[in-house]
Image (tube, rainbow, N blue to C red):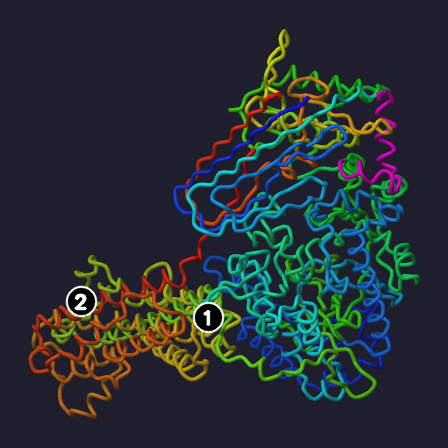
């Protein structure tokens, strides 16, 4: 056993220790994990920490914007050690969280309907009427099953005596459940044996319950209910989770302008027209949900959503208005409310909280300012917590004046000494560190009452004495293992039976936004591939050949480099060393046209498709992005740049392989493929135009190389490339995936299929282009200097351009149009 | 008195609007002192949907939606109402007592005024607004007397200037510029009253524009009007008009009330498309 496993682990009496019962003595439910850690060699520990990091990175788990072109990528922080809780203790937490969810839902339903709690003076009016989260237009909306709070989270902390307390309630759109799921997938694989032996309870059933309950309560109109997950978009800090949950739950991920309200019903704008939406699991803040009736200074959201909910035509989860309960001021009233509404005492206390709106509480707070934390009473205030113990005399006076001036806006809370648990730091993985932790527990409503996720999101503080645990401030997270006494069951409360009429074949619910993104994903992926190949062709010739040696090919290559924007006119006079540098920069420098900037575009589009792309797609993209980022950091040699291009081209082939072999042939796939073919068609036309502009005795090896057709050519002709056979292979041969014929025929076929599905609407159907292709006379037209061929290349290029425009107008046009608010007096 | 009111709103758009959803607060609220003899709202082009209901505050509201592309939208409301005189309220109790009752809360009986004690989207409460109102609300002064004094001061110290502000000008700016329109003066007065812990609501409506012989012409002609309603305890709600320095009587026609303009905007909507837009609003109040 490594003697120093606990060498730097701070034992303390000021905190409850989750792992140790006494110094060097693990608690019973930690013994097996502890023994395993103690018997692991330091190198193996290091490997494990790195494995976890790599998983997080490869899966692209991020907390803020994924691959934001400007901002920094911040990977999700996941500690390899789970928080372990025994079955008996968990039973208490579970019951308390279930009770609290039930209670909060009852309060919410009362406040948005009869308001008996206000009439009976059990709730002060300031906590409702003075709360910016009290949404007046939502009063009186009848909700199915009297459930407004579908998904609820409680932030728990454990005090030194071992008791659990509630720090905060998350009632609007609790985040983190998806991260908890991702943490579980990684950590359960890391400790696969232990995970099984300890009979850790599974969390998958919880998510199934959430999804099935939404479908259960969604308004019925005979059709299978369509639920969607509403996100504010890729710039939200937890967008990764939105996309992840959407994919896991099988819900379309939508933004506000993907939805529209007509006749008091909510519809998803899809390729095949409007599809009725029955339930919305929302991650968009409620005051932004409806510009018609809610916030009057924002046009985000879905105009008319409140009315659709009012008419009972859509289920919104959590119900609009549930943010009301996220107020520290409410905590002090819960014991009485629990007694009044449920007829039983509150099972788990809230951390001691005083709402300064009560004169008695205010004077007590003022007398004890040094020992409390001051927070805003309402979530809209966005006040940073102020720690009384940090304030000097002047600071205390200032805070006292602030509280006295507007007491109802503030609460004071007792400072909680959080419990501590071991974390494994990557800088010294062989030694455990003690860190303060908090536990977020989730509950979801089901027809049989609230169900609590057996597990949750454990968060650990960054430093040894952090008082606030927050992922925003760079804390880390842990998987949460709830042990069971018996065998683990994978039961579901709401097993749904599928019948023949429920079977789905086509992607009917493909939103127009997703289709547009798939199309551009195809185009950018192909463009990156073309760019990488062209840069490789050019770099090799600049390095390996003298200007005289490459004279017969360089005019075409440099023409193409200029044509696609990789070199500008000034580069014409550059010597070889300067040229090599320019080409190398085009590989790694994302501030100029080239591979790195093309990849940035590809990642931007991909990040809008998170829930549609498989994990393998992600890993491939991530690897290229990371490699390029690393290369940019150091002075990259020319040969390194070439090696880089080799790896990138292999990655792009992998991506193309996923599209070919891993995607269902639905309409979305057709749009992606059309994007690829239009891009390739344009590149091929440009390449041949430039080659034909070169000398008649030009070297054509580079053309074959660029079109990945050298092997085919050699196996067919065993001779030096000549115009007729090369042009035949790259223009007329429908069996060559890099020929113009292949692109044109494929596009023609896709267009007719899309027309079958959605009717006419595209004028450029490529009929003329295909006919012209078939009318080519090889002997006359497939020659250097053929005016007909030059005209055809121009025309095909123009046709592909028209087609792209028309696809946009016909299928994507509404994306980008935004709602605007108007006021008239 | 009996009135005919015509309220016409006309939008012209540079490009077609493909979807337009509007909420109209253009139907006078039925009240003990106000009877609606006839009322109709005409919309051109014809809306795909038109639904009437009551809003959170009990005001009639009409929702319309237009789903065919259009480049102009006209909404014409025609109403005939009879407004009875309102007796001068006996609201002499000191204002502090009311403020204290509202702060202490009292369950069901006080829930109606409690709705109007707090900040609202368009009425921010800040130090300067509190200080401005406090000058009228001296210790022990009767609530109505103090409120009338505040009404008089706003009328005297602020200049009516339709060019100085827009529908989105914040209260801070109004207080600084000392200029504005009826909506701004109503928000200012509401801010002053709420800062003292009193309950005040925003009333949207119209005012008679024909000056009776020998009396000055009232401001607010040919536009919708706004004033303030103050909770005076057992004396109920008393309406005051800071734009015209008067108690509201039978020459004011009430459309709707709420916490501020944002709750009862005569026409609030969301459109998709449209480009640049022009708006013309015409209000005509004729005594019958």
Q: Mark on residue A794?
A: 2
Chain identity of mark 1: A
| For marks 1 and 2 on the same chain, the one whose residue lies earlier in the sequence | 1
Which label sits in the foreground, 1 or 2? 2
Quadrant where the N terminus of chain A lies?
bottom right
Asked if the residues shown at circle 1 and circle 2 are in contact, with their CB atoms under 8 angstroms apart, the answer is no
Residue B196 lies within the magenta run: no
Quarter of the rendering containing residue A421: bottom right
Marked residue chain, label 2: A
Q: Position of residue A398 (x, y in %)?
A: 76, 36
Q: What stretch is highlighted in magenta?
A: B90-116
Mark 2 closeness class: few <14, some 14–19, many ≥20 residues within 10 Å: some
Please identify the quarter of the rendering in which residue A519 is found: bottom left
In terms of depth relative to the viewer, which is nearer, A797 or A564? Answer: A797
Residue under numbered circle 1: A626
Q: Measured from the top left, where is residue A31 in percent x and y?
A: 80, 83
Secondary structure at numbered mark 1:
helix
Q: Does the magenta stretch include residue B97?
A: yes
């Amino acid at each position: 056993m490594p003697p120093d496993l606990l060498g730097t682990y701070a034992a303390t009496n000021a905190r409850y220790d989750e792992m140790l019962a006494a110094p060097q003595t693990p608690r019973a439910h930690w013994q097996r994990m502890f023994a395993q850690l103690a018997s692991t060699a330091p190198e193996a520990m290091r490997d494990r920490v790195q494995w976890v990091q790599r998983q997080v990175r490869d899966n692209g788990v991020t907390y803020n914007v994924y691959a934001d072109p400007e901002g920094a990528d911040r990977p999700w922080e996941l500690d390899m050690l789970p928080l372990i809780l025994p079955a008996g203790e968990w039973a208490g937490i579970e019951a308390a969280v279930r009770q609290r969810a039930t209670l909060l839902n009852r309060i919410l339903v009362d406040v948005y309907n009869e308001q008996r709690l206000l009439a009976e003076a059990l709730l002060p009016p300031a906590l409702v009427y003075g709360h910016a989260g009290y949404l007046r237009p939502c009063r009186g909306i009848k909700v199915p099953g009297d459930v407004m709070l579908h998904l609820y989270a409680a932030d728990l902390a454990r005090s030194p005596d071992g008791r659990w307390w509630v720090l905060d309630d998350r009632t609007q759109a609790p985040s983190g459940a998806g991260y908890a799921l991702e943490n579980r997938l990684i950590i359960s694989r890391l400790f696969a044996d232990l995970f099984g032996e300890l009979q850790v309870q599974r969390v998958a059933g919880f998510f199934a319950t959430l999804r099935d309950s939404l479908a259960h309560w969604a308004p019925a109109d005979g059709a299978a209910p369509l639920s969607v997950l509403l996100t504010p978009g890729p710039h939200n800090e937890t967008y990764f989770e939105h996309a992840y949950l959407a994919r896991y739950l099988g819900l379309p991920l939508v933004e506000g302008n993907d939805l529209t309200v007509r006749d008091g019903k909510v519809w998803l704008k899809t390729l095949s027209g409007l599809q009725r939406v029955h339930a919305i699991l929302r991650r968009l803040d409620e005051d932004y949900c409806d510009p018609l009736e809610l916030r009057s200074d924002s046009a985000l959201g879905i105009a008319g959503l409140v009315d659709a909910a009012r008419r009972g035509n859509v289920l919104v989860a959590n119900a609009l208005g549930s943010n009301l309960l996220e107020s520290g001021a409410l905590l002090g009233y819960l014991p009485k409310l629990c007694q009044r509404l449920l007829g039983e005492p509150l099972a788990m206390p809230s951390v001691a909280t005083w709402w300064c709106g009560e004169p008695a509480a205010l004077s007590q707070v003022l007398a004890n300012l040094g020992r409390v934390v001051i927070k805003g009473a309402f979530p809209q205030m966005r006040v940073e917590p102020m720690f009384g113990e940090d304030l000097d005399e002047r600071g205390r006076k200032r805070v006292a004046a602030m509280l006295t001036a507007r007491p109802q806006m503030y609460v004071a809370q007792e400072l909680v000494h959080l419990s501590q648990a071991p974390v494994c730091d990557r800088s010294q993985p062989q030694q455990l560190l003690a860190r303060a932790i908090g536990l977020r527990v989730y509950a979801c409503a089901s027809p049989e009452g609230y169900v609590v996720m057996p597990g949750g999101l454990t968060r650990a503080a960054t430093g040894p004495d952090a008082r606030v645990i927050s992922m925003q401030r760079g804390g880390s997270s842990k998987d949460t293992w709830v042990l069971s006494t018996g065998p683990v069951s994978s039961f579901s409360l709401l097993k749904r039976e599928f019948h023949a009429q429920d079977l789905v074949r086509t992607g009917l619910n493909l939103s127009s936004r997703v289709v547009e993104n798939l199309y551009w994903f195809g185009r950018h992926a192909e463009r990156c591939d073309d760019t990488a190949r062209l840069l490789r062709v050019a770099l090799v010739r600049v390095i390996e050949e003298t200007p005289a040696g490459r004279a017969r090919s360089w005019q075409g290559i440099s023409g193409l480099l200029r044509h696609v924007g990789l070199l500008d006119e000034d580069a014409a006079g550059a010597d070889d060393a300067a040229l090599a540098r320019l080409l190398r920069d085009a590989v790694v420098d994302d501030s100029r046209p080239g591979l790195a900037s093309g990849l940035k575009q590809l990642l931007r589009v991909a990040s809008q498709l998170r829930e549609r792309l498989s994990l393998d797609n992600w890993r491939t993209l991530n690897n290229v992005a990371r490699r390029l980022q690393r290369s940019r950091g150091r002075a990259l040699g020319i040969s390194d740049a070439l090696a880089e291009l080799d790896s990138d081209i292999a990655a792009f082939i992998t991506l193309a392989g996923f599209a070919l072999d891993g995607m269902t042939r639905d309409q979305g796939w057709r749009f992606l493929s059309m994007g690829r073919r239009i891009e390739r068609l344009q590149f091929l036309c440009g390449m041949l135009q430039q080659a034909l502009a070169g000398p008649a005795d030009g070297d054509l090896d580079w053309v074959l190389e660029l079109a990945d057709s050298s092997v085919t050519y050699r196996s067919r002709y065993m001779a030096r490339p000549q115009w007729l056979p090369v042009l035949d292979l790259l223009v007329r041969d429908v069996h060559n995936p890099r020929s113009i014929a292949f692109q044109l025929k494929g596009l023609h076929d896709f267009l007719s299929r899309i027309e079958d599905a959605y009717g006419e609407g595209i004028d450029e159907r490529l009929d003329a282009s295909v006919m012209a292709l078939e009318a080519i006379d090889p002997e006359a037209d497939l020659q250097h200097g053929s005016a007909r061929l030059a005209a055809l290349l121009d025309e095909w290029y123009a046709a592909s351009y028209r087609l792209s425009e028309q696809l946009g107008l016909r299928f994507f046009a509404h994306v980008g149009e935004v709602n605007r608010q108007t006021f008239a007096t | 008195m009996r009135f005919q009111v015509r309220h016409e709103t006309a939008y012209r758009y540079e490009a077609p609007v493909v979807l337009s959803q509007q909420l109209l607060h253009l139907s006078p609220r039925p009240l003990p002192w106000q009877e609606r003899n006839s009322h109709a709202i005409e919309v051109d082009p014809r809306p795909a949907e038109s639904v009437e209901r009551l809003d959170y505050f009990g005001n009639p509201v009409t929702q319309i939606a237009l789903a065919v592309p259009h480049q102009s939208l006209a909404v014409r409301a025609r109403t005939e109402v009879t407004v009875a005189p309102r007796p001068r309220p006996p609201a002499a109790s000191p204002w502090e007592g009311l403020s204290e009752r509202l702060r202490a809360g009292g369950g069901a009986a006080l829930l109606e005024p409690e709705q109007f004690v707090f900040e609202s989207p368009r009425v921010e409460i800040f130090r300067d607004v509190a200080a401005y109102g406090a000058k009228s609300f001296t210790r022990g002064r009767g609530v109505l007397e103090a409120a009338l004094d505040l009404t008089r001061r706003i009328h005297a110290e602020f200049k009516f200037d339709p060019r100085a502000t827009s529908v989105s000008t914040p209260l801070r700016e109004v207080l600084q510029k000392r200029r504005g329109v009826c909506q701004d003066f109503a928000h200012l007065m509401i801010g002053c009253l709420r800062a003292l812990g009193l309950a005040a609501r925003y009333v949207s409506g119209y005012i008679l524009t024909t000056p009776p012989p020998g009396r000055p012409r009232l401001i607010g002609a040919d536009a919708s009007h706004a004033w303030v309603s103050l909770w005076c305890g057992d004396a109920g709600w008393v309406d005051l008009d800071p734009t015209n320095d008067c108690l509201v009587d039978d020459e004011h026609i009430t459309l709707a009330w709420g916490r501020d303009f944002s709750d009862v905007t005569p026409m609030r909507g969301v459109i998709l498309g449209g480009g640049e837009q022009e708006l013309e609003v015409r209000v005509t109040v004729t005594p019958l």
